Image: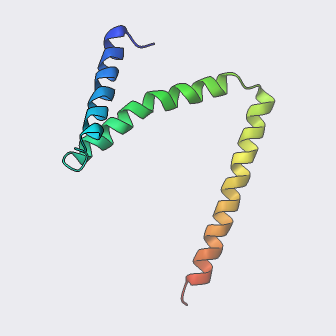
């Protein structure tokens, strides 16, 4: 868990991002806006994923894995067909 000091740091970063957006300063500091968005998203993403997977049974996890593999295979098939269609020999 985050200490209160780290939580205040994140709240400060969120306020900084909100300030930049409120006064339309994003064009002046685009890289800072990107960095702030990434930094503020990472912890939430990791915590959400962890909470999601901790609640799943082995059978549910296997189902998720098989579903992911099926989607990945389908995407690869479409990708390969597109490459083959537009490849000039």
Q: Is residue 73 above or below residue 64?
A: below
Q: Furthest-front residue in view?
A: 23
Question: Which quadrant does the N terminus fall into?
Answer: top left
What residue appears at the point 70 percent right and 22 percent down from the top-left corner?
55
Q: Furthest-right residue in view?
A: 59
What residue appears at the point 30 percent right and 27 percent down from the top-left corner?
15
Q: How many marks?
A: 0
What residue appears at the point 69 percent right and 58 percent down from the top-left corner?
73
Give the percent coordinates (x, y) of residue 54: 66, 22
Q: Furthest-bottom residue in view?
A: 89
Give the percent coordinates (x, y) of residue 11: 33, 21
Q: Furthest-left residue in view?
A: 28
Figure quadrant of residue 5: top left
Question: Which quadrant does the C terminus fall into?
Answer: bottom right
Q: Is residue 1 above or below residue 47?
A: above
60 with respect to 23 (left or right): right
61 with respect to 11 (left or right): right
What residue appears at the point 24 percent right and 40 percent down from the top-left corner?
23
Q: Nearer the viewer, residue 34 or 17?
A: 17
31 with respect to 70 (left or right): left
Figure quadrant of residue 59: top right
């Amino acid at each position: 868990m985050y200490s209160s000091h780290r939580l205040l740091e994140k709240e400060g970063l969120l306020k900084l991002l909100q300030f930049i957006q409120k006064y339309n300063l994003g064009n002046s500091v685009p890289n800072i806006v990107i960095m702030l968005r990434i930094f503020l998203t990472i912890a939430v993403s990791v915590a959400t994923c962890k909470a999601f997977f901790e609640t799943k049974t082995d059978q549910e996890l296997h189902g998720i894995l098989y579903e992911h593999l099926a989607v990945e295979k389908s995407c690869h098939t479409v990708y390969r067909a597109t490459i083959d269609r537009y490849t000039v020999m």
